[in-house]
């Protein structure tokens, strides 16, 4: 296959500042300590981390004809990511966010939906888009033209071709359940946050949530749980909790997306489930040690060094 990882969906330009404790009144100004730019989004951040870890990556999404889109493409290319499937979407801007990072790492954002809702995978592109060991859809719920039957068919074709499939959502709510349910029968690993999983399922207990999604056809539910770690629930009966690493948090933007990439690397390298989860959890933790998606992640070697020497909570 041409690629290890095909990352399809939500790509965004982020401008981030910290620490932000309030928005100035009127035309006032508050001074902050740090500003950064990043490629983010459930597909974009995952693509960058996977590339930093040495995977061959195809980016699949939409960009506007603007400065933000130019920068996103250049940044992806900087990491060796193939951007030939990043579509230029006329009439819309690049999906972009202004992220106001609080002292505790939380990151309220102002977001423009933009080109993520305007791209689609054409029939002529399917062979290239699915020519990867792991096919990831990240950002279901934001992809206006792809959500629903188009993404259902794409994921079904990926499974027909024997690809490993992973799925992440964007700030899901109960209204997104129909769309997610259509993808689950052809999804090997569904990787929402615990908050998203609760909103979709209407349930609270993580074991019940895991069973709920397996009953809808998914192979395995993996829920990220912030400073409580992550939870793995496979249809074969394997269930376990992976604790979070004890770190000083700078910014949580992109932590779930870094987890997705670390998980994909574990799949590509054929690690066992616990090793895969530990690598994914370490990726999420390191991501939180810098401002913006991927800022704290350097390489697979440095992440392995981190996980071998850093205590869990």
Image (tube, grey):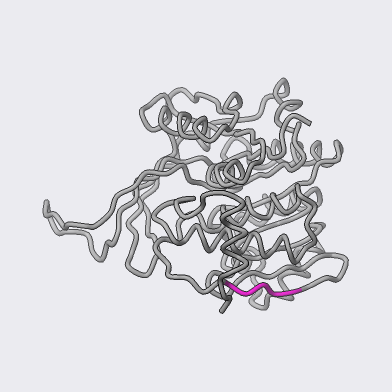
Q: Is 124 on the left or on the right of 298, as rendered? A: right
* Count of numbered circles in the view: 0
Q: What is the x, y in percent for residue 189?
A: 74, 55
Looking at the rendering, which quadrant does residue 48 occupy? top right
Q: Is residue 312 above or below residue 193?
A: below
Looking at the rendering, which quadrant does residue 22 occupy? bottom left
What's the magenta bit mostly, secondary-structure-wise?
Answer: strand
Q: Is 198 on the left or on the right of 2, as rendered? A: left
**Residue span colored magenta:** 240-244
Q: Is 246 on the left or on the right of 135, as rendered? A: left
Q: Is residue 206 above or below residue 258?
A: below
Looking at the image, which residue is at 46% across and 22% down?
90
The C terminus sits in image quarter: bottom right
299 or 104: nearer the eye? 299
Looking at the image, which residue is at 56% across and 30% down?
119
Q: What is the x, y in percent for residue 130?
A: 75, 33
Looking at the image, which residue is at 28% across and 62% down?
19
Q: What is the x, y in percent for residue 243?
A: 62, 75
The reply to whether the magenta stretch includes residue 17 is: no
Q: What is the x, y in percent for residue 39?
A: 46, 42
The N terminus sits in image quarter: top right
Q: Is 81 on the left or on the right of 207, as rendered? A: left
Q: Is residue 158 above or below residue 88?
A: below
């Amino acid at each position: 296959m041409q690629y290890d990882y095909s990352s399809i969906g939500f790509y965004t330009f982020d401008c981030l500042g910290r620490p932000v404790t309030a928005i100035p009144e009127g035309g006032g100004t508050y001074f902050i300590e740090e500003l950064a730019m990043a490629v983010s989004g459930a597909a974009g951040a995952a693509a960058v981390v996977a590339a930093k870890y040495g995977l061959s990556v195809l980016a699949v999404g939409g960009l506007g004809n603007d400065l933000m889109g130019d920068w996103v493409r250049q940044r992806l290319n900087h990491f060796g990511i193939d951007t030939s499937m990043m579509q230029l979407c006329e009439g819309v801007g690049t999906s972009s966010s202004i992220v106001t990072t609080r002292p505790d790492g939380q990151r309220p954002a102002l977001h423009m939906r933009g080109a993520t809702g305007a791209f689609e995978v054409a029939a002529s592109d399917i062979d290239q888009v699915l020519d990867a060991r792991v096919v990831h859809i990240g950002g279901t719920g934001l992809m206006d033209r792809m959500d629903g039957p188009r993404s259902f068919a794409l994921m079904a074709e990926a499974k027909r071709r024997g690809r490993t499939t992973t799925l992440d959502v964007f700030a899901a709510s109960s209204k997104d359940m129909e769309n997610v349910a259509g993808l689950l029968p052809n999804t090997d690993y569904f990787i929402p946050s615990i908050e998203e999983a609760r909103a979709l399922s209407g349930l609270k207990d993580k074991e019940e949530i895991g069973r709920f999604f397996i009953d809808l056809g998914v192979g395995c539910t993996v829920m990220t749980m912030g400073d409580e770690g992550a939870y793995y629930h496979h249809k074969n009966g394997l269930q376990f909790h992976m604790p979070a690493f004890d770190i000083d948090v700078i910014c949580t933007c992109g932590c779930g997306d870094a987890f997705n990439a670390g998980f994909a690397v574990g799949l590509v390298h054929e690690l066992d489930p616990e090793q895969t989860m530990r690598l994914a959890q370490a990726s999420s933790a390191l991501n939180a040690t810098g401002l913006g998606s991927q800022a704290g992640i350097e390489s697979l070697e440095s992440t392995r060094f981190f996980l071998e020497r850093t205590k869990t909570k």
